[in-house]
């Protein structure tokens, strides 16, 4: 299974590891299918480390009567447990896709994409995919990494958004 994140800087295609981390993959794919990631920003960018997004509470598409907690939430309404699969799944390269969390059992909707190897995250964040298109030189991931940010890694100037998500049954489908 794969998805394409259609961003303001180009398309990023991600293969999801449905068999290895079924609950995490289900959460990500269901949120994508619901449109929960549509119009959400990449709100944290740290060069040579990560690009983070997926805070569904920041979507410009939901209305004020929709109760989405700050930071976003899972399809189950709160947090869910990690699915750590080391040594098989590691933060060993550019383009690894993981759940962002505040510690064990605090996965919601947010995720990040590594910009280089980040082994210190192994065993702490659930890896659920990898970028299969869009991490190349001059590609969307590199364009995001180059954006000007403040001291907290928040992009400045033009917004960097996930405009929409397309779900593909076949990871190599166009």
Image: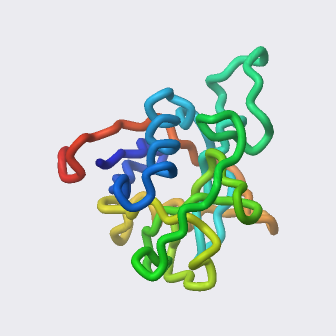
Q: Position of residue 108 (x, y in %)?
A: 66, 47
Q: On the image, which quarter does residue 129 sit in? A: bottom left
Q: Residue at x 64, y 56 (%)?
A: 81
Q: Position of residue 8 (x, y in %)?
A: 49, 44
Q: Judge whether 144 appears above or below 22 on screen.
A: below
Q: Is 43 above or below relative to 143?
A: above
Residue at image position (71%, 35%) is 57
Q: Residue at x 52, y 42 (%)?
A: 27
Q: Is residue 31 left or right of residue 72?
A: left
* Residue 159 visible (yes or no): no
The quadrant holding residue 41 is top right
Residue, x 67% and y 63% (percent of image)?
148
Residue 92's place in the image compared with 152, above or below, is below
Q: Nearer the viewer, residue 137 or 79?
A: 79
Q: How many marks?
A: 0
Q: Quadrant of the C terminus?
A: top left
In this rendering, is residue 139 above or below 68?
Answer: below
Q: Nearer the viewer, residue 39 or 73?
A: 73
- Which residue lies most toward the top here? 65
Residue 50 falls in which quadrant of the image?
bottom right
Give how far across and how far down residue 12 sits, in percent. 38, 53
Applied colour scheme? rainbow
Is residue 46 in sight in this rendering?
yes
In the foreground, 82 or 97: 82
Residue 120, percent from left and from top: 62, 84
């Amino acid at each position: 299974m794969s998805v394409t994140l259609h961003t303001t800087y180009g398309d990023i295609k991600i293969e999801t590891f449905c068999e290895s981390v079924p609950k995490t993959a289900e959460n990500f794919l269901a949120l994508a299918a619901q449109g929960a990631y549509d119009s959400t920003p990449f709100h944290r960018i740290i060069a040579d480390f990560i690009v983070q997004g997926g805070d569904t509470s920041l979507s410009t598409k939901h209305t004020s009567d929709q109760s989405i907690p700050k930071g976003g939430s899972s399809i189950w309404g709160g947090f869910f447990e990690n699915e750590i699969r080391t040594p098989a799944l590691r933060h060993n390269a550019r383009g690894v896709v993981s759940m962002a969390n505040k510690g064990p059992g605090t996965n919601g909707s947010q995720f990040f994409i590594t910009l280089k190897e980040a082994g210190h995250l192994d065993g702490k964040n659930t890896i659920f995919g990898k970028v299969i298109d869009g991490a190349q030189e001059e590609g969307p991931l590199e364009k995001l990494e180059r954006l000007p940010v403040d001291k907290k890694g928040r992009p400045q100037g033009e917004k960097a958004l996930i405009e929409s998500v397309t779900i593909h049954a076949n990871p190599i489908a166009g």
